[in-house]
Image (cartoon, helix red, strand yellow):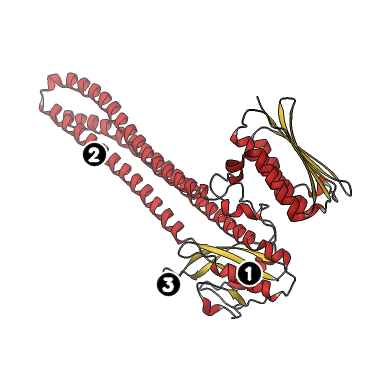
Amino acid sequence: MKRVTTSLKAKILLLSILPLIIVTIAITMISLNQAHILSEQEIKTFEENLLHSKHQELQHYVALAMNAIEEIVEEAEPGDKNAEKEIKNMLQNLIYSSDGYFFVYDMAGVNLVHPIQPELVGQNLIELQDTNGKYVIRDLIRIAEEGGGFYRYLWRKPSEGHQEKKLSYVVKIPKFNWMMGTGLYIDDIAKEVANTRLKVTRNIRNTFFTVVVILSATIIVIALIGVAINMHSSQLADVRLRELAHRYVQFQVSQRRNFARELHDGINQLMVSVKFRLELARDKLLKGDESAVHDITKGCDVLNMAIQEVRRISHDLRPIQLDDLGLESGLYSMTSEFAERTGIQMNVRITLPEQRLPDDIEISLYRIAQETLTNIEKHAQAQHVGLKIWSGEGHLWLEVSDDGRGFNPEKTGTGIGLLNMRERTELLSGRFSIKSRLGVGTRIKVGFAIL
């Protein structure tokens, strides 16, 4: 009878522990698997955001370099040795950070500019391969010929003295038949991703160990309770069993609450880590010029910004003319310089409200007018240009018109400049319209709601 009672109590003890073990293991495995999947997704997103920020940073650098040499390129003739020399000298001196520089090759693969490795200048590197077997210069030239783009390869890192992964962005300078570009080493991305993965793995491992400790403690406590029950008299067995069952339910609820809290804290740590990394990527992205950085679809496309504003590119992109002169004087100054530079006759009429306009409307009007005049100078072949600002219908209107050659907006109205103007207007819930016909001219009208 004693043996039967002992066996029964052992079975009861086992039945008390086994469900908890099974449920705990199941919950733990499911939670760990979900945490692993989530962490890999977040790490992948984190890595993609870092690469995206590198892409935008490279496009930004190339755009600045193209802006710096734009005037020389436009005025030079193909084969102009003086212009070529001046451009080479400019690019030779454009060095940023410890490992950032610009390189230039002709389409035969001969290096023309390399400020970090001057011994390469004059060498034909068309057959150069990295340790992975990639024909680096050949591939870069092909990408430039196809309209420009990104390329990954291995190259010697000046600050390290050995080869590292590098991401480059190249474009073509058609007038000189050159390939120009710059690159960033992306070994730091791999390090940051590895550090993030290490922290995530550590958090998951800590959570697992916590669960194991909780499970072990639970099993020990239940086993001790079972031993204590066996030490009491048999007549109290039923009471003790009911007490044990009651305690078991309470204990299980408490342990599950603790387990849930541990999972919650672990996931919170993971999310805080990911949030920190995403904020870091966002901060890096905000160091670039968001309104100036766009996918460059052709090698010869550059940001449509005036030369005098290149030195003023900063995070807020606010023209100094608005601070020094105000909107009206700034526009008169800009149109006067435009007329003097191009010889195009300007007709300017500006009537602004008495109250000062909000900063976002002022800068949008200024930038749209600036972009429009730049497009006219480059493409319109106009003799007369009119710029008018007035108030009406609860809106402040800007209209710029010219008598140039015009274009078909449905076919060629998706250029970067027009997209910039439309996006600026739509961001402030404004109205944007463009009318143009071949041989007649173009009129752009923008309106912003004002109180």
What residue is disc 2 on? Answer: 216
Instruction: Report the disc number at residue 87.
Output: 1
Question: Tag 1's secondary structure?
Answer: helix
Q: Looking at the picture, how far across and down is residue 99, in whole percent?
A: 47, 65
Q: Is residue 103 visible?
A: no
Marks 2, 1: nearer the viewer: 1
Q: Which image quadrant for residue 379?
A: bottom right
Q: Estimate how packed mark 1 is, as few (under 14), some (14 to 19) or many (20 or more) residues with alpha carbons within 10 Å.
A: some
Residue 303 or 228: which is nearer the viewer?
A: 303
Residue at the location (24% across, 32% down)? 11
Residue 352 or 414: which is nearer the viewer?
A: 352
Question: If the image is split into quadrants, where does the C terminus sit?
Answer: top right
Q: Looking at the picture, how far across and down is residue 83, in whole percent?
A: 68, 71
Three-letter amino acid code of the residue under disc 3: Gly
Three-letter amino acid code of the residue under disc 1: Ile
Question: If the image is split into quadrants, where does the N terminus sit?
Answer: top left
Question: Tag 3's secondary structure?
Answer: loop
Q: Is residue 404 left or right of residue 208?
A: right
Q: Estimate how packed mark 3 is, as few (under 14), some (14 to 19) or many (20 or more) residues with alpha carbons within 10 Å.
A: few
Task: Decide: is 198 above or below 77.
Answer: above
Q: Looking at the picture, how far across and down is residue 407, in whole percent?
A: 84, 49
Sequence-earlier tag: 2 or 1: 1
What residue is disc 3 on? Answer: 161
Residue at the location (72% across, 67% down)? 174
Question: Tag 2's secondary structure?
Answer: helix
